[in-house]
Amino acid sequence: MAGLSSQFGDTAAFDAFYSTLADEKKDEFLRVGSLYLFLVKQGNWHVDVPDTDPVIDYLTNSFKLVSLFSLVESLGAEEHQDFYEWLGEVADEIYPIDDKAALARLHERYKATFGSIRRCTRFFERLPPQRQVRLCESITFDGAPAKSVKHVAQFLYNLRSKFVHEGEFVLDIASVPVFSRHKKSNTLTSLTMPELLATFEEGVVAHFRHAA
């Protein structure tokens, strides 16, 4: 498997791991690995504009981050449920909603059960401890490392969402450390795209090892 080859010493090691998976998990494993190879690892966003490089790092990195989180979300066992559909299902116990603060608390409750960030956080929390430490050290908030890998997952997911919903390019993941400001915190990000891809590859194997 070319997309995840970094996680296996040779073909025999890959075959040994693959043989431990249930049939339905084998198909899912191949699906994720193949999409990752073409969309992210060997995939770049190209532009065809005179006097412009065909691959611009912050453009391609923005699309890579969206693709990575799409693949992570696809690994979740729960089907996605819209927030407003969920409100309808629990209407008997929550209505009337008194104010914006009450609605915000309900949204947090929804995210804890059905939100995409929950699946993403669980993916990162299955990483080996040493990888989690490196991730936390790669992003500082007001001079302090990320409190947990959950904090890292939320930060990266927010970068993804800013691009998807507001058209803000992902500038924080670059070949050099990037200083920026997010939600009243000064952040310094030294996480590169190659390091993030290595994290994803390790996380995919950890996910399927847990599911085996």
Image: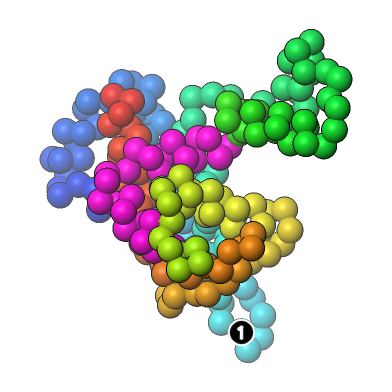
Q: Tell me the quadrant of the picture where the C terminus can be found.
A: top left
Confirm whether residue 74 shows in the render. no
Tell whether 128 sits left or right of 108: left
Judged left or right of residue 105, residue 64 is left
Q: Position of residue 201 (x, y in %)?
A: 34, 48
**Residue topped by disc 1:** 52
The answer to whether residue 142 is left or right of residue 22 is right
The one nearer the camera, 186 or 19, is 186
Amino acid carrying mark 1 in the image: Thr
Image coordinates for residue 31, horizontal then vertical, percent: 43, 37
| Corner quadrant of residue 97 | top right
Tally of numbered discs? 1
Residue in view at x 43 percent, y 51 percent: 147
Magenta-drawn segment: 116-139
| Image position of 96 with respect to 76: above or below | above
Q: Main secondary structure of the magenta part?
A: helix
Q: Position of residue 102 (x, y in %)?
A: 77, 31
Q: Residues within 10 Å of mark 1 (few under 14, many from 20)?
A: few
Rendered residue at 72%/22% (across/down): 86
User: Of all residues shown, which one is farthest toward the bottom?
Assistant: 51
**Residue 1 occupies quadrant:** top left
Name the element at disc 1: loop
Q: Residue 175, can we see it?
A: yes
Is residue 132 highlighted in magenta?
yes
Within the image, what quadrant is residue 108 found in? top right
| Residue nearest the viewer, comparing 2 with 182 | 182
